[in-house]
Each structure stands twice: as structure tokens, then as C-alpha cells.
Image (spheres, rainbow, N blue to C red):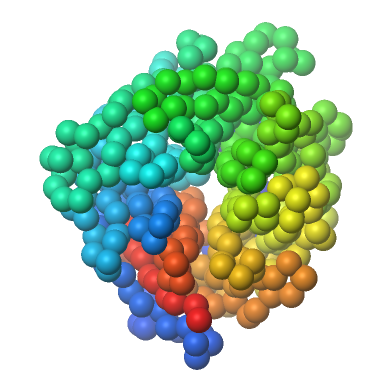
Amino acid sequence: MRCAIFAFVFLLVACKEKPKPIEPYDEVVPSAIVLKSLESPTQGKSHLPRLKAVNDVLHMTWVEQEDSLAILKYAFYENEKWSTPATITSGTDWFVNWADFPSLAVNGETVLTNILEKSAEGTYDYDVKLHLFNRTENSTESTLSRKRKTNFLLNTDGIPAEHGFVSSAAYDGGFYVSWLDGRNTKNENPEENQMTLRNAFVSLDGEISQETEIDARVCDCCNTATAITLNGPIVVYRDRSDAKPEMRDMTIVRWVDGQWSTPQSIGNDNWQLTGCPVNGPAIDTQEEKVVVSWFTASNDNPRVMTAFSITNGEKFGAPIRIDSGNAIGRVDTQFLWDGSALVSWLEPKGENVVLQVARVYKDGHHEEPITITNTSSERQSGFPQLEVAGKTVFVAWTDLEDDASQVKMVSFKIN
């Protein structure tokens, strides 16, 4: 089945009302945590935020909509001030989707992001177009003048099919980029008509090399997650087993001794599902340490899980459940300096759907979650973003109040 199978997740939470505003936040948070509203650099109708912190600088991309025109923008937050937002690119022929959002990676002063551009008439016929540029200190014009390479194809198969769900991570001399590749879905042989996972290396000059298929059959519409350990790149994604009924569990592949490892399950949820839940994993690394968070609904029990590794992702500890029940998912995760991690997710709470954040430790315990905001289970609310810069935590999400999407943000500090 293709990406049209969204209904499963939303049957789990029958919440279609508009999000109820919080004035101020209606959740009592721990005394040490003070949520601070942060002015967003976005304008007008905005959504699909992505965050990345490097050396205490917070980088952000998002998409603004002006009728049929989609605009990918970028800004960075440094010394408690946003840079002038820069337009990276715009177009009317993009595939703009709540779950298939632009990626964001930063290597020194070089930023890599992407858009999805329609390649044919089919609903899911689109390509990945990369954009590579240097961040600057001042104006939009100077940022645009320092672009390294723009609008270049990641997937070069030339087949009008689905190519998306991109994730990327900075590495020596460039970036490792992973994506779901549908070139084989146009194959008439049913046994070969499968969504695949591919990876390539993109240099700081935009040269693409080492393109490899690293899994020949994966879940069609769940985001991927790419990160770097002391041993090199790793990719986490939702796999799709050949067994009947199918298993749709979290899986990791690692770069070991010059090649990609055999896919290995994380958590062994044994979630049997004949459709895509549109709910991929989140990952962060800290030298040899890895944290992965994900959503599963195996045994009709929707929940958010987190697992830690101290062996570059080779082995993981027992999964830790952190939600309060009947979770929706859409997770993100970030390490803190002490080896614990923050996890964000959506779940119902009373009549509302809320965005939660909790601190979890590798020994299996976690602190009580704090509620960042009321939100919505609607697709347009997208995937909230969590990022840590120094000891400041940033959270961004798409607010749907008054039927007009707008990126909103808060920050808080952890002692």
C-alpha cells in the first residue's frame, strides 16, 4: 500500500477539534523549568520547521506558502537574535507534504537542505533537489550570494517515482544523506516492486558519491533518521519484513569496515501492519552513544519508546516507554550533556492533544513530562522539532489556530 494509507494513526486518536489555546501554558511544569516564548522568524502562513544546533548556534529552515507558491527559508539564532530570514528557493511545482519535510544539516558554516520537486503527473512522482550554501552574518542578499550549489538532484535514476523522506548528517568533508527511493515501485514484477532505502555522500562542493541501496524493502512513508557516531554514519528507519503479516519495526544500519551492515531491529516491537503509519524515528548521537525514539502500536497499544546504545548503535538496551498512554507519536530526541536525553511527542490529554517533552535516562527511568503546548492530531500540525544548544532547549511546532498554520517556538533552560 502507498502513502495514501494515513487513516490508521488517526483512528487511534479521534481528535479533530481545533487546538485549544493556552494562555499561558495550562500545564504546571517543574519549578526549575520556565518556558519562554520565542519570536519566530517566519512570516505569514508557515509550516514544516526544521532545527539544527551547532556550536550554540540554532539553525532553522521552514516553508512559507503564498497561494500556490512554496518558499523554503532559512535563518539562524545566535546571541539571542535571529538573522535576517533568507529565501533559499521557491516554486509552484513542489510536493509539499506534512510528513515529508525538508532535511537540515550543518557542517561548519555550510548548510545543506532540500525540497521535493514534481517529476511527472503521478501524485507521488517527485525528486529530491538539494541546496548547499554558506550561512552569513547579515542580510538575505549576502546569504544568497554565497550559495555553493543549488537545485541539484540527489536521486539520479531518472525514473518518475517517489523520492523523499530525506535525512542528513554532517561528516568530514560533507554530508551523509539518506532517503526513501521508489524507483523499484515502477517495476512490473510484484516481488521487486518495493520502496528502498538509499544513502549517498554529498561533498561540501555538492559532488555526490557512494550512492548505495542499503535496504531493498522498507516502509513506504515513514521519515528516516541519519546520524554520525565515532565509527561513522548510521541510519534508523521503519523496516518492512517479507513475512506475512508484515512487521513494521525500527531498524538500524551502520557503516562498518567500509560497508553498510545488515539491517538490525531495535526494540523488536513485532508490529504487524498492512499499511504505513507515517511515523518515523528520531535519533541523536554523542560520540559512541546513540539514542533512538520511535512510535509503535503493536498489540493495539500505541506508545512512544526510547532506547540507548553505548556501542555506536551495535547493541541497544531495553526500550523505555515514556508516554502516558494512547500516544500519537511524531517524536524527536536530543542528547543532553550528561548522557540523558530529551524526547518530544504528541499524545491526547483530556479533550486536548498536547506536545510533551520528557527527560529520560539510560538506566530506564524518566522524569515527569512537561507540556509545551496544546496542539492537534491533524496532519497539518506536522512533526514538532526539538533541539539543544548548550543548556538551552528549543522547541518548534506548527500551530493551526484559526485555520492558519504558523510556526511557533519556545525555549527553556535545564540546570
**Left or right: 209 with respect to 319?**
left
At a point 70% along the width and 37% down the height, the residue shown is 254
At a point 22% along the width and 34% down the height, the residue shown is 146
Give whichever of 363, 332 is nearer the camera: 363
Whether residue 275 appears in this view of the structure is no
Where is residue 81, by image quadrant?
A: bottom left
Where is residue 11, by image quadrant?
A: bottom right
In the rendered image, residue 335, in percent from the top left (x then y), is placed at: 58, 62
Where is residue 410, by image quadrant?
A: bottom left
In the rendered image, residue 317, in percent from the top left (x then y), is placed at: 80, 58
At a point 77% along the width and 16% down the height, the residue shown is 191
Q: Vertically, is 94 above or below 46? A: above
**Left or right: 65 with respect to 22?**
left
Which image quadrant: the N terminus?
top right
Q: Vertically, is 149 above or below 342? A: above
Residue lying furthest bottom: 31
Give whichever of 359, 169 is nearer the camera: 169
In the rendered image, residue 169, in percent from the top left (x then y), is placed at: 51, 41
Whether residue 386 appears in this view of the structure is yes
Give whichever of 193, 77 is nearer the camera: 77
In the rendered image, residue 375, in percent from the top left (x then y), is placed at: 46, 66
